[in-house]
Each structure stands twice: as C-alpha cells, then as structure tokens.
Amino acid sequence: MKSKYRQIQVAALKGKLDLPAAVIAETPKELGARCQLRFRESNDDLDSTFEAFVQTADGHQFGLVCHKHAPKPGIELILPVTEKNAATRLGEVLNLLSIRKQDLGWINPVIKRQLTGKKPADYSKSGVGRGLAGASRVRETSVRRRAKISQD
C-alpha cells in the first residue's frame, strides 16, 4: 500500500510555507508517535522549535512547527502562502493526520470563515479583516479626528 504522505527536508520548502492555518492541540511527541513523523529541533526568528515538513501523495506540502516557549502548547499547521483554497487543504491535512476540528486550539480566521460560511465579528472600526487598505483608511480617519479634537 502506497503511503499517503512522506516527510521531506526543510530546505525544499524555504520561504514557501508562510500561512498559519491552525494550531493542533497536541505535542510533537504525541503527534509524531501517532503519525510516524520525526520532529527535528531547529529555531526561527521567534524561538527554538520542533519541526516536521510533509508532502502528501498528490504533491501538496505543509509544515508542522512547535515553538518551545509558546504561551499555549500546540503545533502550528502551516500551508503554502500561495494556497488558493486553504480551507479545503486544511480539511485534507486534518483527515490525513486523523485530527478532528475539535482538536484544534486555533483556526486562522479567514480559513474559519471559509469553513463555516459565517463572517467573523464586525471589525469595521478597526480595519481588521479589510486588508491593509482598510486599516490604512481607518488610521487616516483616526489621525484626522485626533487633529480636529486637539484644535478645539
């Protein structure tokens, strides 16, 4: 029987995985034992890490990264930043690793919206969720308001 996935070296993925999709509420030791993955020690610009990088049988790649000193334990599931349908890919990865959505500690809000079809809370005043252009317009408006208040 052909394996559904294989572990790959990080060098093959440099700069390609940049979309945090979810946090799996397990330790690398637990997930590694259950899924026959070897997490290697490394580090990034934030912390020391345990990492495993995987390629599925159909060629899709994802990363699993655990920061040693994160405030909440868990493994970040990272997808390629170019992923066009992150919600579908997240579902496939969870299925592949036998992880239920209930076992996730966090899901990227954009992906969660794709999964549920519901919009997140209204962030219209903060500009969050409207991209950088929306946030920039909100900042400009806030600056104008503060300037007007200080003139009064």
Image: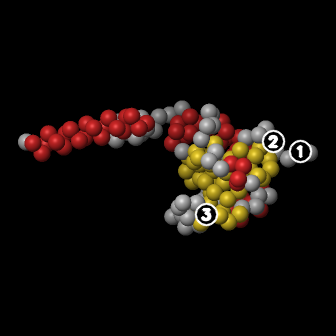
Q: Quadrant of the C terminus?
A: top left
Report the amino acid beneath label 1: Lys
Percent position (x, y) of residue 105? 57, 54
Q: Residue at x 66, y 36 (%)?
A: 88
Taking the image as shown, residue 25 lies to the left or right of residue 40, namely: left
Label 1 environment density (alpha carbons within 10 Å; few <14, some 14–19, many ≥20): few
Which disc is residue 43 wearing? 3
Label 2 environment density (alpha carbons within 10 Å; few <14, some 14–19, many ≥20): few
Q: Give the label, 2 or 3, closer to the camera.
A: 3
Q: Residue extending furthest right?
A: 1
Quick check: 53 above or below 128? below
Q: Nearer the viewer, residue 79 or 15?
A: 15
Which disc is residue 57 wearing? 2
Taking the image as shown, residue 28 lies to the left or right of residue 106, namely: right
Report the amino acid beneath label 2: Ala
Marks 2 and 1, how far apart in space?
8 Å
Which disc is residue 2 wearing? 1
SS type, badge 2: loop
Q: Give the label, 1 or 3, closer to the camera.
A: 3
Report the amino acid beneath label 3: Asn
Quick check: 85 above or below 12? above
